Amino acid sequence: MSRVAFALAACLALSGCSSSDSQPEPEPFPEKDWPAEAATLLEGSDWYRHAVFYEVYVRSFQDSDGDGIGDLKGLTSRLDYLKELGVDAIWLMPIMPTPFKDSGYDISDYEGINPDYGSMADFEALLAAAHQRKMRVIMDLVLNHTSDSHAWFSESRKDKTNPKADWYVWSDTPSAPNNGCGTANPTFGDSAWQLDPARGQYYFHRFYPEQPDLNYQSPAVVDATLGVARFWLDKGVDGFRCDVIGLLFESASECDLVPETRDYIKKLRKVLDEYPGRVMVAEPSKLTDASGYLGSGSDMFHMAFHFGYGYFWGLPFAAQNADGIVDTFEKSLATYPAGAQDALVIGSHDVQRAFTVAQGDDTKHQRAALIQLTAKGTPFVYYGEELALRPGKQEVVDQRDAARTPMLWDGSAGHGFSTGQPWIAFGGGADQYNLEAEQGDPESMYAFYRELFALRRGRAIWGTGAMEVLETGTPTVFALYRADDFMAYVAAVNMSDEAQVAELVRPELGARTSRVLGAGTLTLTSGGATLSLPAQAGAIFRVR
């Protein structure tokens, strides 16, 4: 089925379109001044609950000087595009100095800017330009490990008695009881221990050998890393995405989020609370359970990524069975503390692009995005997903480079990204699936994302309204009920390749129905509603 299944009806108005094209639209639902509502929501302390975040890989977004590498000045030049798209906050992948063994997640200086991307003055200009546009900027904060080129490690490896001797995890043998959870199974490579000839000991690294783990048993490391957070908060950043934050401390039997790690996170939260309006989002190590990162709802993370949906959505869509999606959202509803907020993704720098997961099926991508953007939480959209950016084939660092190719702005030879040779080859379909081409196509992925972002804007219901996973009577249909004091919606997707009719079980579902996006009908009944969806379709209905 084509993208027409998701196109707005000819009577496009975010207040609604008739659920039956042959019937006249009844009196419209009440509306508000949505731009004014958006301004109020995004200026308050809970701004992050109502924002659309956009993850940017600076290296691949926009090159300003022709060297083939994206930079901070280039990103600054594209802020108006992001604002027009409907983005409220930008998440920057690491921009600090690095030997680039792990695409910047191997940091050699916590308080500098990668010269490939520009200077500290360029970063400060980016912050100022974003804030002038009422956009926030958060940064990747990588605290589990540093680069082996970091000055801290250079000192620590000298001998066993220097002032930073205990800043990293050292052992006389390639194993250690207090790190038993990571000894045999590092994330990258064959061993989590690397012999350092200079010191004559082994150091622990959960990831690449060039990324030695910091030793948080040292109070000096705790103080130094909290100082890193303060340094950037003083610069004016609006918060952090905290990389593999659950792995800071290890024990013989447990790796993830041990009590000492929870205590550190609470200290980090107190630091952020010293700066009003700053937020942090966790990258959970337990991919199917983020509840532990949220504490009481106010003493640990503001948000945690919901990877149970975000990293596994391709499986239920491939099976045309929504049970897995139902389970993961019901789990978060049951286990999250009051005040916790989901961070919702369908792709990122660590996994395949949505286009790849959807196996090139745009309607599958759109249905996954519809769930992401209507479930309770804050959406984080990976750069280029709004264009259905295709994967690349060149590998510079590792296989994840397939999802890190340059942004496609137009159909020129350099696709508007650079006048020079790009640091990595463009992904597929660059001549057809670029911004310039898609802006002129009302059925493009770009148009779809624009409409969904517009539907969210100013409507508090999406970020903070109540959510129920509706009983549909069939695993081929997934449906959500979203409600607050002012309005209510039903968002639904057909997981299958055939038209479906589902009976939604929810007394007092609404007063009447008005379709605002997609294709299908919703007819209210005494016990809920009858939902009809075409094959591979999704729809959003306003019901109050």
Image (cartoon, rainbow, N blue to C red):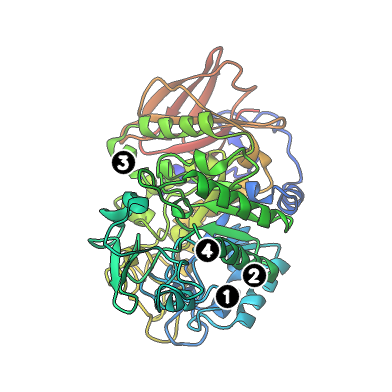
Point out the tag, 4 or 3, that comes first from the N-terminus.
4
* Mark 4, secondary structure of its residue: strand
- Nearest to viewer (mark 1 / mark 3): 1
Which residue lies under the disc numbered 2? 231
Residue 343, horizontal then vertical, whole percent: 53, 47
Q: Relative to residue 172, is residue 51 drawn left or right?
A: right
* Mark 2, secondary structure of its residue: helix
Point out the tag, 1 or 3, that comes first from the N-terminus.
1
Amino acid identity at mark 4: Asp
Report the front residue among 476 and 202.
202
Q: Are marks 1 and 2 in contact (CB under 8 Å)?
A: yes
In three-dimensional space, the C-alpha distance between marks 4 and 1, rounded to whole angstroms, equals: 13 Å
Amino acid identity at mark 3: Leu
Residue 284 at least partly seen: yes
Residue 2 at least partly seen: no
In three-dimensional space, the C-alpha distance between marks 1 and 3, rounded to whole angstroms, equals: 41 Å
Quadrant for the N terminus in the image: top left
* Mark 1, secondary structure of its residue: loop
Q: Relative to residue 340, is residue 143 drawn left or right?
A: left
Which residue lies under the disc numbered 4? 140
Q: Relative to residue 121, is residue 431 drawn left or right?
A: left
In three-dimensional space, the C-alpha distance between marks 4 and 3, rounded to whole angstroms, equals: 28 Å
- Compared to 300, does 133 lie above or below? below
Amino acid identity at mark 2: Phe
In three-dimensional space, the C-alpha distance between marks 2 and 3, rounded to whole angstroms, equals: 42 Å
Q: Residues within 10 Å of mark 4 (few under 14, many from 20)?
A: many
Which residue lies under the disc numbered 1? 111
Q: Are marks 4 and 2 in contact (CB under 8 Å)?
A: no
Q: Are marks 1 and 3 in contact (CB under 8 Å)?
A: no
- Nearest to viewer (mark 4 / mark 2): 2
Residue 411: assigned label: none
